Amino acid sequence: MEQFFADYIDRIQDLHSYYHKAFDGLTTEQLDWVAGDEMNSLCVLAIHVSQAERYWVGVSIGDPIKRNRPAEFEASGYTADDLKQRFEDNLAYYKSALESASVANFGQSITIDLNPNNVWQTTSGWGLLHTLDHTAEHLGHVGITRQLLDRR
């Protein structure tokens, strides 16, 4: 595996570890708790992030998945172990999929097709980097939500 991809996997694994810590010790009901209007539960954030990660890495390496993004924001009923497993499954996929990848290929153009009104071109490298950005961005939301949950 090229060093860039080993570093990429290490970084995303580090981000995942913080998600895992945020879910530790919580019941399904706590994971489904919403702090206020137009806010997301920890469950919703985990489902959204894990699906988005898999989409962006997949599309970047030519193995896209279909997403139902609106459904991600209605997720509920998962246990902490269920949510952690989603991140673990993603990590296993990344390790396998990036094992023989070449950095030289990540300047290639890819089509992002999120819905009929949101189709655009970018590079596969941008897609990989966006995955890290998005996962880190929502980790902040997870941290704040966990703090609010702990203080209620």
Image: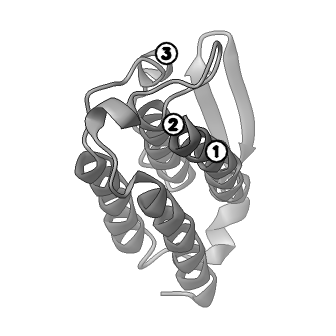
Q: Give left or right: position of 61 versus 39.
A: left
At horizontal 60% and vertical 89% (from top left) the residue drawn is: 3
Asked whether the beta carbons under mark 2 and mark 1 sit within 8 Å of each other, the answer is yes
Q: Calculate the distance from the C-alpha at mark 2 to the C-alpha at mark 1.
A: 7 Å
Mark on residue 2? none
* Up-down relation of residue 114 to residue 148 (above or below): above
Query: Can you tell which of label 1 and label 3 is closer to the viewer?
Result: 1
Q: Residues within 10 Å of mark 2 (few under 14, many from 20)?
A: many
Q: Is residue 100 above or below residue 135?
A: below
Relative side of 79 to 121, left or right: left
Question: To which residue does mark 2 refer?
Answer: 45
Query: Amino acid under label 1?
Result: His
Question: Disc 2 or disc 3, which is closer to the eye?
Answer: 2
**Chain-order first, disc 2 or disc 3:** 2
Q: Residue at x 33, y 47 (%)?
A: 83
Residue 88, given in percent of the width and then of the height, sits at 33, 62
Q: Which residue is farthest front?
A: 152
- Element under label 3? helix
Where does label 3 land, which residue?
70
Which residue matches tag 1? Answer: 138
Mark 2 to mark 3 CA distance (whole Å): 12 Å
Q: Earlier in the sequence, mark 2 or mark 1?
A: 2
Pick the residue in front: 40 or 57. Answer: 40
Amino acid at pointer 2: Leu
Q: What amino acid does circle 3 point to?
A: Pro
Secondary structure under tag 1 reads: helix
**Of 124 and 146, which appears nearest the observer?**
146
